Structure formats: C-alpha cells, structure tokens
Image (cartoon, rainbow, N blue to C red):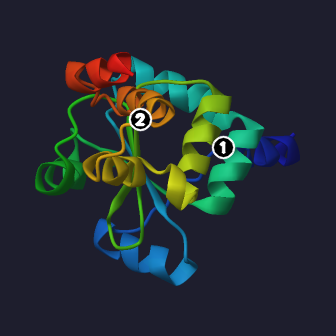
Amino acid sequence: LLSLQSRASDNCIKMRKIPYNKLFAQARKEKKPVLCYFHYKECGACISMERTVFRDTAVADFYNRHFICYEINTRMGEGIAINKKYYHVQLHPTFLYLDPDQKELNKLVGTCSPEEFIRQGKNALDAKHTLLYLKGQYQSGNRDSDFLFEYCYRLRDAYELDSLRVNEYLKT
C-alpha cells in the first residue's frame, strides 16, 4: 500500500520548495524555464487544476522534465510581496512561463484541459511560439491573417485580448 501511495504522489507536478530569490539562479543552473503558478487556497478553479490537470500523468511528466515549477500563493506570506513587487496577478489561476532571466515567455489564465496545458508549455519552449515572440511580431507590423488569428487566441488565453486586435483580424 505504501509503495502504491508513493507512486501516486509522484504522479503530479512537483512544485519546488526553494526561496523565490534563488529560483532563477536554479533555473540558469538547470537550463530550464520557470513555470510560476499563481493561486490562493480558496480558489475553486485552482483546486480543480490541482486535482485534475496537475495529476495527469502526461502533464506531470512533461512539466517535471521541462520546467522548474514554482507556486506563489498571492494571499499568504512571501507570495503577497512577490506578487505586488513583480507580477500584480489578479485572476487565478495564472500561469507565467518565464526564462531564467525572468522574461515572460508565455501566459495562461484560468483552467484548461491536460492537453491544452501541455500545448501551452510546448509553446513556451519553442521560441517562435511564445507569446513574447508573437507580441514582437505584432509590434513589428505583422498583420497576416493567419498570424492575427493565432495572436488573438493566444491573447485570449493570457486574458489580454482586446477589440482592436479582433477587429484587425476581422478586416483580413
């Protein structure tokens, strides 16, 4: 029974238990991006993600292999100060994918399926599919219809979509 319990507990995303001020040094050492999971204890959507998506075998394997995962409770202890100083996250859950230099690569707000969560992680790992890259393409003047379509969806996932970009896409 203990053996089964041990294996079951391994089947989830491992949140690192290190001080925040050492997080990005660890990311540089391991040559991995960071997934910051912003939540709070009473958040129903957060609890749902933790009980389902975080415990999905494929999700756990993918995130534990490719990311340093770190949770920030925005309403307790150090998490309050971290959120105020760096991120100002207001909607929960929010997932920020950051490179070891703390540059935001990708962002996901809200709940999703295990497949979507893995897709978002893969986008963060591929330089030409990060939200950061898409924002740069948009700022550089890319208004191709396929690009705008993808950009609008990614902004929606990050809870940053506005009518300007939707209307630009619709004009194409």
In this rendering, which labeled residue sits more in front, label 1 or label 2?
Answer: 2
> Taking the image as drawn, is residue 15 in sight?
no
Q: Relative to 17, is 74 on the left or the right?
A: left
Q: Relative to 16, is 8 on the left or the right?
A: right
Reading the image, the residue beneath label 2 is 151
Q: At 46% from the left edge and 80% from the top edge, which residue is drawn?
A: 28
Q: Residue furthest front?
A: 172
Q: At 41% from the left edge and 29% from the top edge, which residue is drawn?
A: 157
- Viewer-side residue, 155 vs 63: 155
- Viewer-side residue, 162 vs 56: 162
Amino acid at the residue labelled 1 = Cys
Which type of secondary structure does the marked residue at label 2 adopt? helix
Residue 43 has which mark? none
> What is the quadrant of residue 119 in the picture?
top right
Counting residues from the N terminus, which is met first, the one under dot 1 or under dot 2? Answer: 1
Amino acid at the residue labelled 2 = Tyr
Task: Give how far apart the Cα atoms at labels 1 and 2 are.
Answer: 30 Å
Q: Position of residue 103 (x, y in %)?
A: 32, 63
Q: At 55% from the left edge and 48% from the top edge, which residue is drawn?
A: 123
Q: Position of residue 81 (x, y in %)?
A: 14, 54
- Viewer-side residue, 27 vs 6: 27
Q: Position of residue 49 (x, y in %)?
A: 53, 28
Vertical side of 66 occupied by 72: above or below: above
Task: Judge the density around disc 1: few (<14), some (14-19), many (≥20) Cα neighbours within 10 Å.
Answer: many
Q: Relative to 43, is 35 on the left or the right?
A: right
- Viewer-side residue, 168 vs 18: 168
> Taking the image as drawn, is residue 141 in sight?
yes
Which type of secondary structure does the marked residue at label 1 adopt? loop
Reading the image, the residue beneath label 1 is 12
Q: Quadrant of the N terminus?
A: top right
Q: Quadrant of the C terminus?
A: top left
Q: Position of residue 105 (x, y in %)?
A: 40, 55
